[in-house]
Amino acid sequence: MTPFPSEQIENFHRLAPEIILCAFGIVIMVADAFVQAAHKRALGWLAFIGALGGLLGVHFMAHDPGNAYSNLIRADSFSIFVHLVVMGAAALAILGSFNYLDEENIQRGEYYALVLFATAGMGILAGANELVTAFIGLEMSSISTYVLAGFRRKAIKSNEASLKYFVLGSFATAFFLYGIAMVYGATGTTRIDLIADALQKMMADQGQVASLAILGLALMFVGLGFKVVVAPFQVYAPDVYEGSPTPVTALLASGPKAATFAVMLRIFYVSFGTAGNFWFWAVWISAVLTMIVGNFAALVQTNVKRMLAYSSIAHAGYILVAFAAGTDIGIAAVLFYLAAYALMKIGAFLVIAHLGQPGEKRLEITDYAGLGGRQPVLAICFSLFLLSLLGLPATGGFLGKLFAFQAALDSKVVWLVVIAAINSVIGAYYYLRVIVAMYFWEPSKEYLPSKVAPTLAFALAIAAVGTLYLGIFPARVLELAKVAADSIYLR
Amino acid sequence: MTLPFILFFVLALTAIGGALLLILAREPIHSALSLILVMMSLAGLYLMLGAEFVAAVQIIVYAGAIMVLFVFVIMLLNAGVEERTEYSKIAKYVGIPLGLLLLLDLAHGMAHSLMGRAPANGAGSANVMVSTRDLSLQLFQKYLFPFEATSILILIAILGALVLAKRDE
């Protein structure tokens, strides 16, 4: 009889963020039964504390990095970096939800519990060193977000978003699962690092990688590509992003994307990177399609929320440019981009959440006319996020793009960078149009935007300061990203 | 021609036939019944591979619980005969060839990877017997973490169903 493996229990601090998040999620569920409807906001604060507790948990992780649970989970610098992005995004999204949920009259404990569970799933994704574990993490984050997307139950668009996301998302997950099965069939293991060994041995013995493994990788690319919203798997995204409650859209665009890109980096770089870069062209083509589809579709949108949904497709394309580099610098560039992107995208969507008014009626670009005169501080914040998305110097978005393009150029992926640069220029049009509307258009008379609540103002301030910080003093975060990139290959 | 060989083909062909019937039948209840056929023959295949636990789970969970759910839904919705519209042109001229291409590719990939050599580490191999005891040792030791995380996953699913289906107070 094998003795009970006690070392697994001893490593539980390497999962501290997930344990804390799930514990808070369960406490919120229980407390929800006892809290009166008028005081539901207290549960939101509990969730915010939970997210901060998750960040504290990352500290425990960082204190003693290593593997946990028979090497299924890795607590390395890479995982820590992604954890910080994901937990930060969750905390900001929770802060931005308080007033929105009051306005929509859906202030409920389940919302916050689901956000925390989703974040725990993203954390598992970031640290997964094994494909089944990654699958469970992916499902935890996906299923929670399917429900969150439909949280405005009386809005038909929200119902549509939830159903579409659920049906297509389950389909994509099936692809991912089938891919895992094939890779297991070809290599005999689901551990990400051991797959690399098996493939290298295959290369040495037969001079090529089994086509079953490549097919498996292709299917996993479909499944994960859906979750990070890259073309040609992006069709659902505009409807889902537009229909979801706006703070949920903010979370969707930042957290799951970062976590899924993290697990993609591990699978593509660690498992399938050492035995030849045969995924390069798939990523290349997908990057080009993603950028073009995202930017050109965004050009014709008049609904600002939908426009930002297309813009987030375009940004996934820029991240794939860094991804295609295939080097350590590429990983660092992806990570830096994800951090900068999360901050500016959450900021932009939270502004939209505020301006939307009950029922999300005010989403057209004409509703933004004259905002610069009416609410100067809010307009400056929104302009900052839009300029960062555009890639103006001194913002996080600019440096994110710069590092991404640099990493690709270092790997001689010149044409992709040329296409990406052209796309950035096209993208400038639709971001600037909103800024022009805010400052130069005649304000509409019948619509007066309401005041910004303190919690939302706080969240926006953090996002804005973070965006500027990454744009002006990037050295520290870039250094962290580089350390994280190095740690991904360590055994 | 050994007995397992014949048995394999019988079960495999039943599974494929059932799957075809499943998508071609016009009565929903016929589709549901052919799905049971598929599940049962797959359970038989698992049994032949020495995976008695998976076979039992297949029958209990899929052929049992999930199929009962299907039949109940069909009964409650009172679903009639499916109405066929003209097939979409894209599905006909692009979807079917692409599906066949995928089938050939998969068949080729699997045949190429598995033919002429022992499967790596006993994956998918018929000559390694995996007992229920081995399976549970794996599940509760090596794969303890995903197993535990699944309980949170189920909790999320329950919570989600509650959120979306609960009546407003």
Image (cartoon, rainbow, N blue to C red):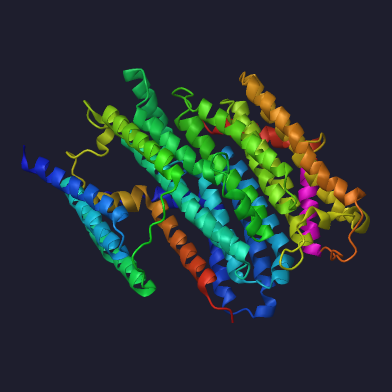
Q: Which residues are magenta?
A: A453-467
Q: Position of residue A98 (x, y in %)?
A: 71, 66
Residue A389 shows in the view: yes
A274 horizontally vs B65: left or right: right
Identity of the residue furthest to the front in this view: B86
Residue A62 shows in the view: no
A216 horizontally vs A279: left or right: left
Q: Main secondary structure of the magenta part?
A: helix
Q: Position of residue A47 (x, y in %)?
A: 64, 64
Residue at the image point whose x is 59% and y is 74% from the top? A32
- From this view, report whether residue B52 is shown above or below residue A180: below
- Is-magenta flag for residue B139? no
Q: Position of residue B31 (x, y in %)?
A: 29, 60
Identify the image quadrant of residue B9. top left
Residue at the image point whose x is 37% and y is 74% from the top? B76
Q: How many callouts does the rendering have?
A: 0
- Is-magenta flag for residue A464? yes
Residue at the image point whose x is 51% and y is 46% from the top? A125
- From this view, report whether residue A138 is shown above or below residue A144: above
Q: Position of residue A450 (x, y in %)?
A: 84, 66
Identify the image quadrant of residue A53. bottom right
A444 horizontally vs A240: left or right: right
